[in-house]
Amino acid sequence: MTRAAPSLRLPLPDPDATASLGRWLADRLGAGDVLLLQGPIGAGKTHLARALIQHRLAADGRMEDVPSPTFTLVQVYDTAAGEIWHADLYRLTHPQEVVELGLDEAFSTALCLIEWPDRLGSLTPPQALTLTLAADGEGRSATLTGPADRLARLGAPPQP
Ligand SMILES: Nc1ncnc2c1ncn2[C@@H]1O[C@H](COP(=O)(O)OP(=O)(O)OP(=O)(O)O)[C@@H](O)[C@H]1O
Ligand SMILES: [Mg+2]
């Protein structure tokens, strides 16, 4: 018998709910955490990452744009609580590029938010949390999966 992976499921009826989940995660994740953001084009991956990063920047008294890393592949934010790496790997053609970008090292030293994480292949960190966004009516739903002890330490996410 196989056991289902531990997971938390959340309805996200509107973009504010996605942003609020991002801010909730911002208060609970830190250096060495890897959040894999899964979901199709337009699912809200960047929207969630932007809210998370801006919440962490606001803690340092900073208000900054957080552009999508669509073309740069990686944007790095230096915060008082450590670096945040925001990556969009859609355009990656080979997992070796992950090493060239320095992402494999950042997995253990920074908080990493990764869009299109399927491109990581065998370089996917085993301890990573995965947030999957899916269309749900006019809104989205989110499912968070990962190691049971890590999920337990996160506690209950906000209900919209
Ligand atoms: N819960 C939600 N309900 C409805 N719309 C949402 C929700 N969350 C985010 N959105 C909207 O989805 C749109 C697309 O979001 P976003 O650019 O973050 O997608 P993405 O997953 O990063 O896409 P890509 O794969 O192209 O990078 C945005 O306009 C955002 O406001
Ligand atoms: Mg995006």
Image (spheres, rainbow, N blue to C red):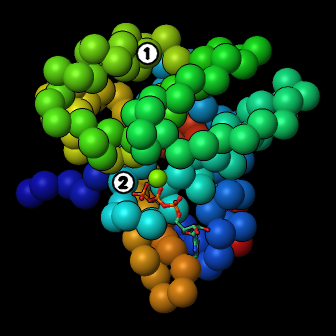
Asked whether the beta carbons under mark 1 and mark 2 sit within 8 Å of each other, the answer is no
Amino acid type assigned to the residue bearing label 1 in the image: Ala
Residue 114's quadrant in the figure?
Answer: top left
Name of the residue lying farthest toward the left: 1
Q: Nearer the viewer, residue 28 or 102?
A: 102
Q: Quadrant of the N terminus?
A: bottom left
According to the picture, the residue beneath numbered tag 2 turns out to be: 38
- Of marks 1 and 2, which one's residue comes earlier in the chain? 2
Q: Residues within 10 Å of mark 1 (few under 14, many from 20)?
A: some
The residue sitting at 65% across, 76% down in the picture is 14
**How many circles with numbers are drawn on the protein?**
2
Q: Can residue 89 be seen from the camera position used here?
A: yes
The residue sitting at 60% across, 32% down in the picture is 29
Name of the residue lying farthest toward the front: 71
The residue sitting at 35% across, 28% down in the picture is 127
Q: Looking at the image, is 5 positioned above or below residue 39?
A: above
The residue sitting at 23% across, 44% down in the picture is 118
Q: Can residue 113 be seen from the camera position used here?
A: no
Residue 28 is situated, as x and y percent measured from the top left of the image, at 65, 35
Q: How much space separates mark 1 and mark 2, taking CA atoms?
A: 19 Å
Q: Nearer the viewer, residue 148 or 31?
A: 31
Residue 151 is situated, as x and y percent measured from the top left of the image, at 48, 42
Secondary structure under tag 1 reads helix
Secondary structure under tag 2 reads strand
Q: Nearer the viewer, residue 151 or 57?
A: 57
Amino acid type assigned to the residue bearing label 2 in the image: Gln
Q: Is mark 2 within 8 Å of ligand 1?
A: no
According to the picture, the residue beneath numbered tag 1 turns out to be: 106
Q: Quadrant of the C terminus?
A: bottom right
Residue 154's quadrant in the figure?
Answer: top right
Q: Nearer the viewer, residue 67 or 86?
A: 67
